[in-house]
Image (cartoon, coloured by chain):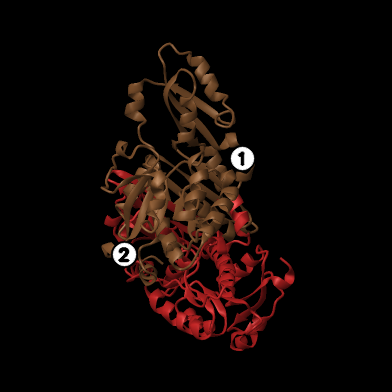
Chain colours: A red, B brown
Amino acid sequence: VSETTKTRIGIVGYGNLGRGVETALRNSPDQELVAVFTRRDPASLSLAYSGVPVVPLADVEQWKGKVDVMILAGGSATDLPEQGPDLALHFNTVDSFDTHADIPVYFDKVNARAREGHHLALISVGWDPGMFSLQRAYAQAILPDGDTQTFWGRGVSQGHSDAIRRIEGVENGVQYTVPIEDAVRAARAGLGAKLTTRDKHHRVAYVVAAPGADLERIEREIKTMPKYFADYDTTVNFISAEELARDHQGMPHGGFVVHSGWSSDGTQHTIEYKLNLDSNPEFTGAVLAAYARALWRLWNAGERGAKTVLDIAPALLSPKEGAELRAELL
Amino acid sequence: VSETTKTRIGIVGYGNLGRGVETALRNSPDQELVAVFTRRDPASLSLAYSGVPVVPLADVEQWKGKVDVMILAGGSATDLPEQGPDLALHFNTVDSFDTHADIPVYFDKVNARAREGHHLALISVGWDPGMFSLQRAYAQAILPDGDTQTFWGRGVSQGHSDAIRRIEGVENGVQYTVPIEDAVRAARAGLGAKLTTRDKHHRVAYVVAAPGADLERIEREIKTMPKYFADYDTTVNFISAEELARDHQGMPHGGFVVHSGWSSDGTQHTIEYKLNLDSNPEFTGAVLAAYARALWRLWNAGERGAKTVLDIAPALLSPKEGAELRAELL
């Protein structure tokens, strides 16, 4: 691929995920990062690998025609609900919107703006939603008489870690989500539908408390926090700031999708897809970069509006051509 | 789905795989089996579940316009190389052609005949090639700096079992392919590229010898058989016909694809897709039925020629609509 025909990629947002996308693009033969867009002071950002311009997000429209695909690396709580529809009007976009319950509404909004601007937008790309969604769809289409269970971990949940850090008297904290082995066995045996939320995962927190803080109260507030912890068995460990820095700095994650189904009476099959990730944002960034390739091909083929990973053929993710894929991978 | 709008499916060939397809169609809300085609005497076949006509394959052209998708359930050695191109001229077809090295040539032949007849043909559908191919493609597109290894088993290899049964003095036999744990660990650690054929699998044979047969010679002939056994460590167990009937009648199979790759120096991720199948032909039949659904949608959308699983978006396999899939599965 010659330099001039590389797909020009922009990254919107330069937190952990934005850096993950930048990292992934270094391994991509046919894509090049051309700019990073931020709401922060551009002078305050130094990029990890690239010498490309850092541009105020307010100036993004000046980059129309200079960016083929924008990868939106903002968060699902407040960034993407605004940025997703807004940017789809002006650019082709890929995002990792991951608030499962809000996906239908978000899809409709992005779809409308993308169509209005004659662009293509891929929403909810990553591993869950994303690669896990694919596996759920494939498995249920092949074995409709069955049950699918998704397990997360062992890995760090940023949302739950943030929730702990908001408690009074907490200086820092990290939360690991851990699948419960008995539940995994039940899912493989096809008994997953009987599992409750509490059966599937437990939560393990490592907390640095402020000097003199009431540890009993902190532990109680964590364990009873609605939505985040109340429905789970949670273990709270108080540790020092030094221990947290030494043992809990990575962002490992992963999980697995288990589908157990029957093709006929007594004939059972198990399909399992498992991810074991050293870095959640670097892996998610790599998925976003691969889907940016697919998006650019489909946009050039005339596709417009919003799509998800379920709408994208696997071959479109690869830089290789069809004949090469058939010979090497089929 | 009303009866009249169901997709009309034909099955060509009624061995284990043909029966597997028939079984899968019982779980399909939007497809109906309309005929089974055979080279045998139709009167000699009794279908497991269906009351549909059994038709001599020689009369298949009389069914043009009465079958929407033909699922070809013949073997890759002698059936499909002829039937695949021939039938693609007259029908939309899905097959499970699985001779990996011959796929490019087979694809070209089927593609030419399908285009000539304005049909769509999906080749090499099943689990390997098929679902495993997808997983290899997804994983390598996301983490190009990595290594993919495929393991088969523990499961029965029909080809190797047949090879054993052709040896003089063998009355019956079953061969299991078994992954070697050390090799699986190496693949997960990203060291898979160093593995040899012998490192990855061993082969375990259960053989019923004829009375008075030379067991040493049989064992030697198995272990030194080129292509099938010579490159592997093989264990040969002589058992009675009763033991074979009691313990080795199923057709379990499975295996897994392991991709280990790096997103940056020292940051490693493992992607693993695993199948554990009670019945190889029933699972393969279920995959074929799901892809027949995708094919029919794509043919109606104007697609012609040959395609593989790599060209098919996951959503097309499901009887559910896009909005339903986004709400439930994404």
Q: Where is A19 relative to A79, above or below?
A: above
User: What is the quadrant of the C terminus of chain B in the image?
Assistant: bottom left
A199 vs B107, nearest the viewer: B107
Give the percent coordinates (x, y) of residue B259: 55, 51
User: What is the quadrant of the N terminus of chain B in the image?
Assistant: bottom left
Q: Where is A313 relative to B25, above or below?
A: below
Give the percent coordinates (x, y) of residue B6: 32, 61
B100 relative position to A212: left or right: right
Give the percent coordinates (x, y) of residue B80: 49, 44
Characterize the local packing of mark 1: few (<14), some (14-19) or many (20 or more) Cα atoms within 10 angstroms.
some
Which residue type carries mark 2? Thr
SS for callout 1: loop
B25 vs A241, nearest the viewer: B25
Characterize the local packing of mark 2: few (<14), some (14-19) or many (20 or more) Cα atoms within 10 angstroms.
few
A150 vs A119, nearest the viewer: A119
Residue A16, can we see it? no
SS for callout 2: helix
Which chain does tag 1 point to?
A: B
Residue B235, can we see it? yes
A46 relative position to A308: left or right: right
- Which residue: 59% across, 74% down? A300
Which residue type carries mark 1? Leu
The residue furthest top is: B212
Number of the label disc, if any, that sits on residue B168 = none
- Which residue: 62% across, 60% down? A321
Distance, label 2 to label 1, CA atoms, is 51 Å
Front position among marks 2 and 1: 2
Q: Mark 1 = which residue?
A: B195
Give the percent coordinates (x, y) of residue B23: 32, 47
Which chain does tag 2 point to?
A: B
Badges 2 and 1, same chain: yes
Q: Mark 2 = which residue?
A: B5
